[in-house]
Image (cartoon, helix red, strand yellow):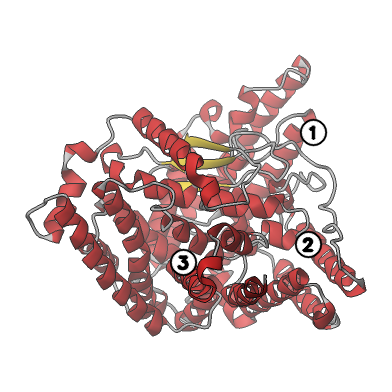
Amino acid sequence: MRLLSLAIVLAVSATPVLALAQATPIAAPQPGEGKEDARLKRLFHDSDEASLARNPINGLFRGDMRRADRIGDFFSDAYINAERAAAEKDLKDLGQINRAVLTPTNQVAYDVFQQQTQTTLKGLDPALVALTIVRPMDHFYGIQTFYPEFASGQGAAPFNTVADYDNNLKRNVEYARLLDEAIVRFRQGMASGVVQPKLVVRNMIAQFDNLLASPVEDSTFYGPVKRFPASIPAAEQARLKTAYATQMRDVILPAERRMRTFLADTYLPAARDSVGLSGMKGGDRLYSYLIEQNTTLPLKAEEVHQLGLSEVARILKAMEVQKQAVGFKGSLPEFFTFLRTDPQFAPKSAAQLREGYEAIGRRIDARIREQFSLIPKTALEIRPVPAFKEKTDAGGSYQGGTPDGTRPGVFYYNTYDLPSRYMWEMETLYLHEAVPGHHFQISLAQENAALPAFMRFGGNTAYAEGWALYAETLWPELGMETDPYQRMGGLSDEMLRAMRLVVDTGIHAKGWTRDQAIEYMLANSPMARTDATAEVERYIAIPGQALAYKIGQLTISRLKAQAKAELGAKFDPRRFHAEVLDTGALPMPVLEKKIADWIAAEKRR
C-alpha cells in the first residue's frame, strides 16, 4: 500500500515535529496563471486532503496534527475500495481541465498527476490487490519496521504536549490492531496460495524477537515517558508513565507476541521456498506492474536484465583501470578481496566514520555552488543508524526533514559489523544520500510552496533514486574521489545499481536463488558478504524497487548529455540542475519532455 511505502521513507528522525494543526494550503498563485490553473490546483488540494483523511499517519510526517491520534485502516477492504474510487474520481476531474491553456509548470504538474494516478489505479486492480493485500508485511516495508521508532520519542511523532502523549497511546492501539488485521490477511493468502517466501518470514520473526526482547522500561515504545518537556506537570508525567507501561504489558507486547507466534508456528510452514515472484501464483503479472511502477517506464524484465549485463561489463572495465592505478598486481576478483579484507580500509571506530562524513560534507559544501543555484534551507544532520535495526539496514540512508525546517534532514550511516563499513565507500555514499543527493532533491521539493502538495511530498523511485545515483556522478565537479580507492568506491556503488538490474530480474523473472544472487554480486564487486546478503534479501522482499536507481540515473545522464550536445557553450550545469529539481520528483517521460522544452527555450535565450 502507498502508506507504508511513504512511511518507511520518512519515519525516522530524532528531532520532534513542531506540528501544524491545519491543512497544507493550496499552492500559491503564480504570475500568468488563469482560471484553469486555479481549477487544477484546487483538484490537487482536494485530492491531497482526501488522501490524508484516508491515510492519517501521512499527515503527521508533514506536521499536520488534525488526525494525530490515528494511523489508518489500510488493510481493510473499505480502504482499498476508497483508494480505487479516489483514483477514478481524480482522473475524471483531471480530464475536465483544459491542459492546453495551463502555464508550462502546471502542464508538468498535470502530466505528473495523470501518470501517477493512472499507475496507482493499475495497482488497485482487484487481480493485483489479491496478490498484495494478502502479503501485508515483509521485513523491509512492514509496519514493524518503522512504527516502533516513530512512536519512540526519537522519531517523527511529536511529544511536546500532554495531547501528543495521549495521541500516541491511541495510535499504539491501532498499531496492535493492525498487527492482528495483518494476521487475517496472511491467513487469506494461505488459503489462496499467495504467500511470502520463507526467507522473508524468518527475517520478520527475527524483527519481532528483537522487539519482544526488551523489558517494558527499556522498550522503544516506553521511550517517550523517559523524557518529558518541562511544561508537562509532574502529575501528568506520573499518569503517562503508568499508562505507557500498562499499554506495553496489556496491548503492544501481546499483539507482537501473537504476530510472532503466528509467523513461526502457522505461516512459516505454509510459506514458499522460492524467493522470486515467478515462483508465486500470479507473480509474473505482478512483477510486470512493479517494473513499470518503479521505473515509470513500460520496460520488460528481459530488456532490463540485458541492460544490466551491459552496464556490469562496462563498469568492470573501469574498475580494471583503477586497479592498475594503485599498482595492484593480481586479478580483479583478487583486488575485490583486497579491498574487502585489508585492515587499512576498515574504520577504527564509529567515531571515525562520523568524523569522516562530516569532513566530506565540508569539502562538498565548499564547491556546491559551482554546480547548483538551488540550495535547500533545511539543515542536514549526520547520525548512526539506530541499534534496533542496524543489522538489517543498508550502509547508509536519508530521512527527510520538515518543510518549515523544524526537523532537519538526516544522513544515517550504519556501524553494524564495523569492519565491513569500508572507508573507500564513504565519499560516494555521502554524495548519494546527503549532498547533492537525497537531501537536495527531497528538501527542495518540500520547501517549494508554489508546488501542489503531491509534488512537494510525493514522488517516484526512478526520479528520487535516479537523482541520487546521478549525484554520485558529480564527483569530479565537486572535488571528490581524487584518491583511486575512493574512485573505486564510486565505481563499486555504480556497480551495485547495475547489478540490481541483473539480480532483481534474475530473482523475480528467471528463477535465481538467494545464494546465486549473492554470489553474482560478490563476483562482480568488492561488496562485503554482509552487504550483498542484505541487498539480495531486500530485492526478495520488495521486487522491482531496486531497478529504479539505474534506470533513473541513465535517463538523467542521457538528458544532460543531450543538453550539452545541443546547447554547447550555452550549457550551464546550475540551470540544468535547477530545471531537473525545481518541480519535485517527475516520472521519467514527464522529465524527458520538460528537459526537451527547456533545451528549446535555452536555445532562444
Q: Quadrant of residue 114?
A: bottom right
Q: Looking at the picture, how far across and down is residue 294, in whole percent?
A: 53, 71
Vertical arrangement, residue 249 with respect to residue 189, above or below: above
In the image, what residue type sits under mark 1? Ala
Q: In the rendering, which numbered label is found on residue 163? A: 1
First in residue order: circle 3 vs circle 1: 1
Q: In the rendering, which numbered label is found on residue 48? A: 2
- The one of 376 and 89 positioned closer to us in this rendering: 376
First in residue order: circle 2 vs circle 3: 2
Q: Nearer the viewer, mark 2 or mark 1?
A: 2
Residue lying furthest front: 569
Residue lying furthest left: 329
Q: Does any portion of residue 142 appear in the rendered image?
A: yes
Left or right, residue 346 beside residue 396: left
Q: Looking at the picture, how far across and down is residue 263, in whole percent?
A: 46, 56
Q: Residue at x 32, y 72 (%)?
A: 311
Q: Which residue is mark 3?
A: 553
In the image, what residue type sits under mark 3? Gln
Q: Nearer the viewer, mark 2 or mark 3?
A: 3
Quadrant position of the C terminus in the picture: bottom right
Q: Residue at x 49, y 81 (%)?
A: 288
Label 1 crowd bin: few (<14), some (14–19), many (20+), radius 10 Å:
few
Label 3 crowd bin: few (<14), some (14–19), many (20+), radius 10 Å:
many
- The one of 318 and 350 positioned closer to us in this rendering: 318
Q: CA distance from mark 3 to mark 1?
A: 44 Å
In the image, what residue type sits under mark 2? Asp
Q: CB atoms at circles 2 and 3 under 8 Å apart? A: no
Left or right, residue 525 beside residue 174: left
Quadrant position of the N terminus in the picture: bottom right
Q: Looking at the picture, how far across and down is residue 177, in whole percent?
A: 65, 51
Q: Residue at x 53, y 79 (%)?
A: 297
Mark 2 falls on what kind of element? Answer: helix
